[in-house]
Image (spheres, coloured by chain):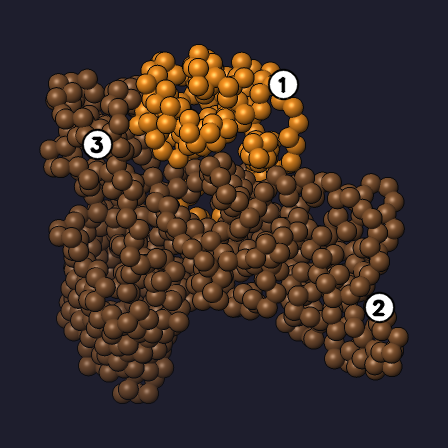
Chain colours: A brown, B orange
Amino acid sequence: MPIRTLPALIIGLSLCTTAQAEQPGTITRLASSEAWLTLGHYHPDTLGSGYTSQADDDDFFLSPNGKANPEAELRATIEAITRPASGNDNDHARCEFPARDAWIRSRLSLREPEVTCSDYNDWKAELNTEAVTLVFAASYLNSPSSMFGHTFLRLDPPREDGETNLLLANTISYAADAAEHDSEILFAYRGIFGGYPGITAVQPYYEMIKVYSDIENRDLWEYRLNLTAAEVDQMLAHTWEIQDRNFDYYFFDENCAYRLLALIDVARPGTQLLDEVSTHAIPSDTIRWVVDRGLVEEIHYRPSAATRVSHSLGELSPDERRLAAAIANGYVAVDDDEVQSLAPPAQARVLDATYDYVRHQTQAEEWPRDFSAPLSHDLLVARSRLQDQPSLGSPARPEVRDDQGHDTMRLGINTGSTGERRYSELSLRAAYHDLLDPPAGYRPGAQLQFLRLDARLYHDKQELQLENLVGVEIRSLTPRDGFFKPLSWQVGFGGRRAELENGDRAFTPYVDGGAGGSWRITNRIQALALLTGDLEISKHLSRGYDIAPGADLALLRQDHRLSVMTGLRSKSWVVGEHHREDELYMQGAWHIARDYSVRAQLSRTHHYDRYETSWKLGFHAFF
Amino acid sequence: MKKLIAGAILLGASSMAFAQPGCGVGAMIWKGQSGIAPHVLAATTNATFGNQTFGMTTGTLGCQTNQSVQSMAMYMDSNIDKVARDMSRGSGENLETLAVLLGVDEADRGEFSQLLQDNFAVIFPTSDTTSDQAVDAIVALLEQNQRLSKYVA
């Protein structure tokens, strides 16, 4: 670029006196401006000094070299938007690229061919947008893999009269357009390495609520952006430009959240939200960036169906709760005296909570329709006879929003010993949250670790060793109660040090998993019991691999100051030389601040008839 | 304004089959929805399965000429469970949405909600009621009501 810019600048200077809009220097300068690069989705090449657009669609470019040449594209666009109208106006570049047209004309005075963009204007009139809200679908209980969240934009109509209704507002989302018949493996592969086209979809908000809030049980956070009318216009104009254009979808970086950031960057040039994206764009992180840049004017919380059900049940007295459970399970009929004799407010509470619970269970646990539908009908008919009884209030907004939790990358510096050997350890994690990290803003009992590397320096021989390389580690420990019976489960894979019979510790690839239950003991403490299975693969094992069924019993306390987990893990290796491996462990974390924790752990293991005590102490920072 | 809302709601549904009063069957209440996508893949995927490229056709739908009623029928088809819930309680945002789609003035909203709550069992006579039947029943109730009949004229 610089080499090409220099002569262009000289020519530009020499022509200054003529003040022509098409001065080569001006255009070269505009072509490298942030605003133009954003409009064209241009990003600096990793190798070389050029730029390449992330759009994977020839129709997005007016110049044949447009994808790799911002300046050629700018020149072609200027030429196209000044061309006299001919044929259908809607095919004119001014109508197809209204955001480019608006931006270029704000910089250069150009001939304005008369065109009427009826398609674009109709579309805009139907979207009827006064403000834009960034909506974040939070993660849901019992599904730590949803932890990354999801984001989309809502186009809010003017708020001037009673006809304003946000359920009917439209939303813009960007998603992978996966073929229905693709297998899950292909789906994951193409998602990571590319191959799915990404499409921009416009859907009413009530459809999004149905998917995220009712079916997936994710709370929605609505961040109303403080964009001006002109900025909203520019965002819509650019949405029009990209809405049928293909941008290949990648789960980790060029994902749903990423493309929305680009739209905000276009709306308000200079925001440069995309500069924050390095290797991955986690939707909850992108919310932080938007909040940090002062783009948010108002925040609203919309609890999911599951959150509402728990809240409704929680509002009942213990007797009312028992009655609700009895009705829901068919032991007590809706017209039974026990229900009818309740005072109207109590009756309304019980009927509302029972209905919400029955719907939730039908959805989540697949209760058969021939049981749940007649019951639902009875409940609503009975409820409709109770006049002027307000429905149960909404769940309170959580004190800490998801975007106010700790940051998702983690660095840990530890020191400890295994047996007699002292070591120092460096731990780095790409994402996201474990059970002992500061819990505020995260779902209790949920853990998702992604790419964690622990390297140890043993003091005695100055020996550097890779201790752990966690690929993925998911734990989901949701307590069971009278109404909800979720399975607690865990799954993970990676590499770790496995102790061999001769006492050596060999780095071994592993896969493990487990399933069981979890029960609340007090408000903050839960007990869990899981059956587990481990598979290790290594040439150091006598058969090349080994399998261990086992169990894990533990107590977990998660709290904003002090989190503790203690338990007993027992495995029985069965393929090679049969042997037991038992571990009694206690881990604690003292959360000094949102992004800092002190960690300690102590364990006693019994393996190959050897006993060993290990401890570790360290400091964790999130960034 | 009313027209814009109707347009906006149709915009999201042009590729779906939906109920028109007297023209189709509509969704049955409590029919259930498909479950959650596989948990492990839900991570950052957010994929849409199938063709989601919505068109913008707002063309005529036949059968019902009243666009507000058409919009209401569409909304009911998609949200019948939640509309029924709000109706039985006499309040709620889905009931509010019906009022908006029919263009019911704020001054008449109380009466509108009351009428639908009182007649819940008429609108949803059985647990197999379809959205189409419910819409027809609502239109009939509104037509008989002196204050509200103007909204379905």
Q: Nearer the viewer, residue B17 or A107?
A: A107
- The quarter holding residue A337 reads top left
Amino acid type of the residue that numbered disc 2 sits on in the rendered structure? Glu
Q: Is residue A547 left or right of residue A313?
A: right
- The quarter holding residue A420 reads bottom left
The first of marks 2 and 3 along the sequence is 2
Question: Does the residue at mark 2 contact the one at mark 3 (Cβ under 8 Å)?
Answer: no
Residues at discs 3 and 1 both on one chain: no
- Disc 3 is placed on an element classified as helix
Residue at the spot of label 2: A22
Residue A349: mark: 3
Amino acid type of the residue that numbered disc 3 sits on in the rendered structure? Arg
- How far apart in space, not on screen, are marks 2 and 3 (Cα)? 71 Å
Whole-percent x, y for residue A510 in the image: 35, 60
Question: Does the residue at mark 1 contact the one at mark 2 (Cβ under 8 Å)?
Answer: no
Q: Is residue A602 above or below residue B95?
A: below
Residue B50 visible from this viewpoint:
yes
Residues at discs 1 and 2 both on one chain: no
Residue at the spot of label 1: B62
Amino acid type of the residue that numbered disc 1 sits on in the rendered structure? Gly
Q: Is residue B60 above or below residue A483?
A: above
